[in-house]
Image (cartoon, grey):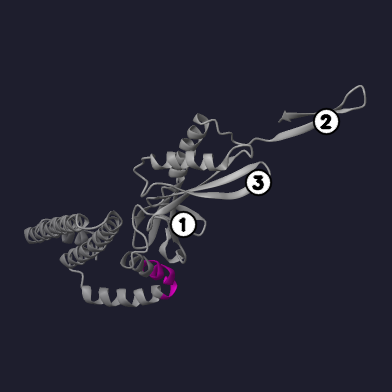
Amino acid sequence: MSINEMYESSAGWLTDQDVWQSIANAAIRVAVILIVSKVVVWIIHKTINRAVLERESKRLSSQARRMTTLGKLMKNVASYVIYFIAAMLVLSEFGIDLGPLLAGAGVLGLAIGFGAQSLVKDIITGFFIVLEDQFAVGDVIQTGQFKGTVEMIGLRTTKIQSWTGEMHIIPNGMINELTNFSLNNSLAVVDISIAFEEEVDRAIEVIRHTMIGMQDPDLIASPQVLGIQAIAPTGVTIRVIAECKPNTHPVVARKLNMEIKKALDANGIEIPYPRMVTYQRNEKGGVTDGTKTV
């Protein structure tokens, strides 16, 4: 074909009203498909949010977090499905035969499947994490060397933010063993040492009276004084425990230490500190003893 023939063919195609009309119709249909898919996704998201809110109001806080996680996962799956269908419809509007394309995609998917087993494992594990309520968004967990608050559970990865701010992105397939610190109430354990010179019964009574009057939103029940836990070279150790809300035991333990220290100081009960006894010879050859604190 000569250049003139190519020019005439192109000019004829560009000036053909039927061609432009078909392009305009296809563009309109594509726009409608995209708009409808967006609207459908929006409706599905709103429906899921409403269903999650209704169930959250009837459940405990821990179960409510799991409903939130399940809602996010359902919205992700719905978005992927709707957008995939929309993409197929758009391709069909451009005259692409979807039959061979889907058949080729099946063969390609089978070939990729052998090399993407880890991806499939991540997705399957992600579903089981949510369905079995292993953990949810907002839970504090530890898996391997990573510990932190769950920020997101996706189809393939889970995001955990440590208390120092680092964001750990972990493939779901790598979560083989984990510890969830948010499922049950935790226990704050505090050991207090008092000097040998102090009366143990009086010290225990002061601590017990202080614990009965302690109020804190993280406490489930009043702290309990268990008694003497150990006898150390420098003093006697008294143990106090307190049942508190999940994963709040470090904060509660610090508050217990503060209140107990104030109570001991107010009652003149001494906390042991290191001492050294020294012996000095006098001029007459005798020995005098003294106590020196270090």
As drawn, the residue found furthest toward the top would be: 283
Q: Helix, strand, or loop for circle 2?
A: strand
Please report the residue visible at 22 percent of the width from the left and 76 percent of the height from the top: 99
Q: Give the range drawn in magenta.
A: 114-123
Between 206 and 174, the residue placed more toward the observer is 206
Q: Helix, strand, or loop for circle 1?
A: strand
Please report the residue visible at 31 percent of the width from the left and 67 percent of the height from the top: 131
Q: Earlier in the sequence, mark 2 or mark 3?
A: 3
Quadrant of residue 159 in the image?
Answer: bottom left
Callout 1 amino acid: Gln
Position of residue 276 measured from the top left corner of the image (x, y, whole percent): 74, 34
Left or right, 134 with respect to 90, comes to: right
- Mark 3: give few (<14), some (14-19) or many (20+) Cα within 10 Å: few
CB atoms of marks 1 and 2 within 8 Å: no
- Mark 2: give few (<14), some (14-19) or many (20+) Cα within 10 Å: few
Q: Earlier in the sequence, mark 1 or mark 2?
A: 1
* 96 within the magenta span: no
In this figure, which residue is indicated by the disc labeled 1?
142
Left or right, 2 with respect to 160, comes to: left
Is 89 rendered above or below residue 201? below
Position of residue 175 measured from the top left corner of the image (x, y, whole percent): 45, 64
Left or right, 66 with respect to 269, comes to: left
Quadrant of residue 212 in the image?
Answer: top left
CB atoms of marks 2 and 3 within 8 Å: no
Callout 2 amino acid: Tyr
Q: Helix, strand, or loop for circle 3?
A: strand
State the separation of the CA atoms marked 3 and 1.
34 Å
Position of residue 117 measured from the top left corner of the image (x, y, whole percent): 42, 72
In this figure, which residue is indicated by the disc labeled 2?
279
For residue 232, which numbered disc appears in the image?
3
Callout 3 amino acid: Ala
Whether residue 134 is visible to the viewer of this picture, yes or no, is yes
